[in-house]
Image: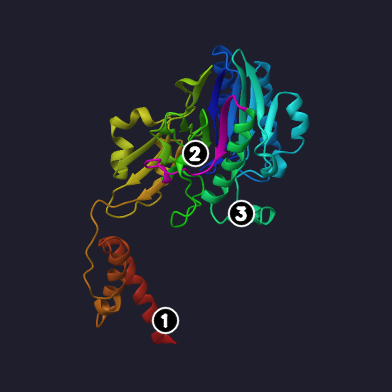
Amino acid sequence: MRILHTSDWHIGRSFHGHPTLDALDGVLEELTRIVRERDVDVVIIAGDVFDSATPSADAYRLLTRALTRLRETGAEIVATSGNHDSAARLGFQSEFARLAGIHVLTRDETLDVPVTLDDDHGPVHIYGIPYLEPALIRHKYPDETLRTQADAVGFAMRRIHADRAERGGRSIVVSHCFAQGVADAASDVERDITSGGIDLVPASVFDGVDYAALGHIHGRATLTDSIRYSGAPLHYSFSEARKPRGGWLVELDASGLADIEWVDLPVPRRLSILTGTLEQLLTDEAHTDAEGDWVSAVLTDTVRPIDGMRKLQRRFPYCATMVHEPAEVADHGTRTYAQRVQGKSDVDIVNEFLAYVRNGQGASEAEGEVIREAIDGVRSEEASA
C-alpha cells in the first residue's frame, strides 16, 4: 500500500493580507498529478484542513475541487481535524463522504474505530486522532486524567493500542499535535499553544504503529523513521522560507513500513528575506532574482526611511513586510529624557526628542529651520494674547 502523508492545508489563510486560495488550488492540482503518477492508494491530511472554524464558501469550494480530483485518481482520502478546524463543521455528513471513499475522522468517541483498507497483504488500519482539547473532552471521561495534550493523546493511543491488539494487521495513526523531539519546530507551530511545555506530546506515545502521520508543524520533520511531520503545502510565513513543501510517500509491505520518500510540491512564489539599507535594496543588482518573490525587507538604515514600503514595492511588487533593524543603535546613556532636556531651550528640547526617537539623529538643517519658525510663531501668538 502506498500512502501520501500531507497536513496543514489551511484553506482560506491569507499571507500578510494577500489571498492564497488560487496558489493553493494550483499546488493541490499538482498533488493530484503526483497521486496519479505514483499510484498512491491513500492520501492523508493530518489536521488543519481549513484555517478557520468558520470557512468561507470559497474555501469549501476549493476543498470540494481538491477532494474530487484526488478521488478521481482512485485514491482513498483520510483526514482529521486540527486546532484550526471546527470538528463539527469539517465532519458534517462524514458518513455520506465515507461512501465515496473520503474518510473524515473528527470524533473523539470513535478515534479507536479505524478506516480499514486492504491490499495484497491484508488489512491496513488507519486511526485518526482529531485535535483533542483536554478542557472540552475531560467531562466525557471522568475516570481519566486529561489536563494536557500529552494526557489526551496518551489516552487516545491506549484506546488505539487496545483495538490494534484485537484486530491485528498493520496500522497507521494520524494525529494533529506538537510532539517532542522536533528540533527548531516551535516557530512553525501554527498558533503556538504550548505553555511551559505542558502541551508537548512525547513521540514515544506513537511507538508500536507502523507509521504515525503527524500535523501541526509547518515544516517537514522526522522524529523517528516511522513518526514524521509533512509540513504545509504552501509557505504561510517567512520563517518557512527555506523549508521545502511537499509530503511523505510511505510504502507498506507485508511486514509493515517498507520505504519512505519525500516528494516535492511546487512553490508558486518564492519567499526572500532581504537585508540592507533602503538604498542598497533598491539598487543592488544581487537582488534582481528576488523581484518576483514575496519579499520581507529588513532595513538597516540608521533612521527609519520615510515611505519605505511604497519605495520597495516599486522594485519588489510582492514586498509583504518591512521591519526596521538599524545596523547601529545610538547609546542614550543612563540619563532619563527629562534629565537630558532639563534647562535647555525649546529648540534643543525638540532636537533631543528627535534624536531619541530617530536612533541618535537630531534635526537636519532644514528641519531645524522649520522648528525655529514654529516655535517663534507660538511665542508671537502668546505675546499678543
Q: Are marks 2 and 3 in contact (CB under 8 Å)?
A: no
- Nearer the observer, 258 or 374: 258
Q: CA distance from mark 2 to mark 1?
A: 56 Å
Q: Please tell me which residue is depicted at 61% across the width and 12% down the height of the picture.
A: 120
Distance from label 2 to label 3 (Cα)?
37 Å
How many labels sit on residues?
Answer: 3
Is residue 121 visible in the rendered structure shown here?
yes
**Spot occupied by residue 32 in the image (x, y as percentages of width and height):** 59, 19
Q: Secondary structure at mark 3?
A: loop
User: Where is mark 3, residue-wise?
Assistant: 144
Query: What is the x, y in percent for residue 339?
Result: 26, 79
Mark closer to the chain start, 2 or 3: 3
- Which residue is at a point 45% across and 40% down the rendered structure image? 204
Q: Earlier in the sequence, mark 2 or mark 1?
A: 2
The segment highlighted magenta reads 168-186
Task: Please give the name of the residue rendered at 61% of the width and 37% of the height, measured from the top-left corner.
Answer: 162
How crowded is the residue under tag 1: few (<14 C-alpha within 10 Å), some, or many (20+)? few
Tell whether position 173 is magenta. Answer: yes
Three-letter code for the amino acid on which mark 3 is drawn: Glu
Q: In the image, what residue type sits under mark 2? A: Tyr
Secondary structure of the residue carrying numbered label 2: loop
Left or right: where does residue 7 sit relative to residue 316?
right
Distance from Cα at disc 3 to Cα at disc 1: 77 Å
Residue identifier under label 1: 381
Residue 189 place in picture, x, y as percent? 47, 44
Q: Find numbered disc 1 in the image and state the secondary structure of the residue it sits on.
A: helix
On the image, numbered disc 2 is attached to which residue? Answer: 236
Indicate which label's residue lies in the foreground, 2 or 3. 3
